[in-house]
Amino acid sequence: MKRNFFLVLSALLLTAPVFSQDDNRPASVLSIQDDIAGLALGTSYNHAFDNRYEGVEGTPFMNKDWENGGIYLLSGKFYNNLKLKLDAYNNNLIFQTNDGKDILLDKSLLDYFILTNNDGTELRKFKVVRTPENPLGHYYQVLYDKDISLLLKYEKVYVKADYQKAINTNRRYDEFKTNKIWYIYKPGDQEPQKIKLNKREAKELFSGRSDVSNFISKNNLNMKSPEDWVELLTFISSN
């Protein structure tokens, strides 16, 4: 189905106060909305997408509901108080305007975005990681980000129904399945390195440091949780 996407990032101004590094004064939301409301033309992103996958189990989005958040641009500007959705299937970020239009953001201009509580407290941070293999970048959730980064990619897989094997697989409909893939990103790496959350992986990854194995044993870390990995990376970064 034909989809008309809004790629004009200036449409962000429809809903959000605007700040920059040189100007901390919010612009008037109402006057900005009046000025550029004419840019919101065509079919909304979410409407077209939902029609395309009507009847499919699951969702292409990380979460099906809109979440509060803010985006930070490479230019230094940021926009907050947005309604955001991460389309994990197509690796796109979308926000919703006050009048219900869904805007596809130009990823090439983004540094990262955050999801927040209603009071603005940061819950999760997602960074655009750009590499030689993927210069446009991919959205990764950031669990730790100092000398070494611990990243999480939400991968949505579209699985077609298998009617011939439906009795055995119980898959009588098309569906989206979610995979969580963990990565370590070290200085000098060309690409984030996929990892498994276990003790063996951690010891092999940092085999050049004898203190890593001792730290894991001393602190009874099984390395099967992101919290254990954050604790280990914090130790490595400070020693």
Image: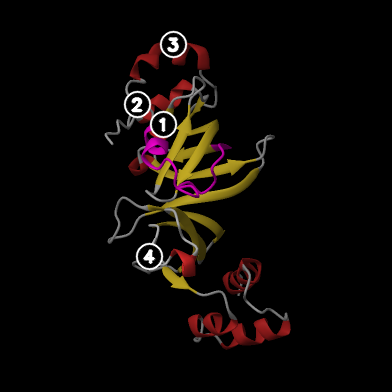
Q: Distance between the residues labelled 2 and 3?
A: 20 Å
Q: Residue 164 carries which label?
A: 4
Mark in front: 2 vs 3: 2
- Percent coordinates x, y for residue 146 in the rendering: 54, 62
Contact (CB < 8 A) between labels 1 and 2?
yes
- The mark closer to the camera, 4 or 3, is 4
Q: What element carries label 1?
A: helix
* Residue 224 visible: yes
Q: Which of marks 2 and 3 is nearer the N terminus?
A: 3
Residue 34: which numbered mark, if any? 3
- Majority secondary structure of the magenta segment? loop
- Label 4's element? loop
Residue on which the image places disc 2: 43
At label 3, the amino acid type is: Asp
What kind of residue is marked 2?
A: Thr
Nearest the camera: 78 or 123?
Answer: 123
Q: Which of marks 3 and 1 is nearer the N terminus?
A: 3
Q: Give the range drawn in magenta.
A: 48-69
Where residue 2 appears, as percent x and y from the top left, is 27, 34
> Does the residue at mark 2 contact the one at mark 4 (Cβ under 8 Å)?
no
Where does residue 190 sit, x and y in percent of width and height?
33, 67
Of mark 1 and mark 4, the one earlier in the sequence is: 1
- Image mark for residue 47: 1
- Give the camera-side residue of 126 and 171: 171
* Mark 1 → mark 4, Cα distance in angstroms: 32 Å
Q: Are marks 2 and 3 in contact (CB under 8 Å)?
A: no
Which element type, helix, strand or loop, lies under badge 2? loop
Nearer the observer: mark 1 or 4; the answer is: 4
User: Where does the image place residue 3, in percent across and percent down from the top left?
Assistant: 30, 33
Mark 2 or mark 4: name the one nearer the start of the chain.
2
Whole-number angstrom distance, CA of label 1 to CA of label 2: 7 Å
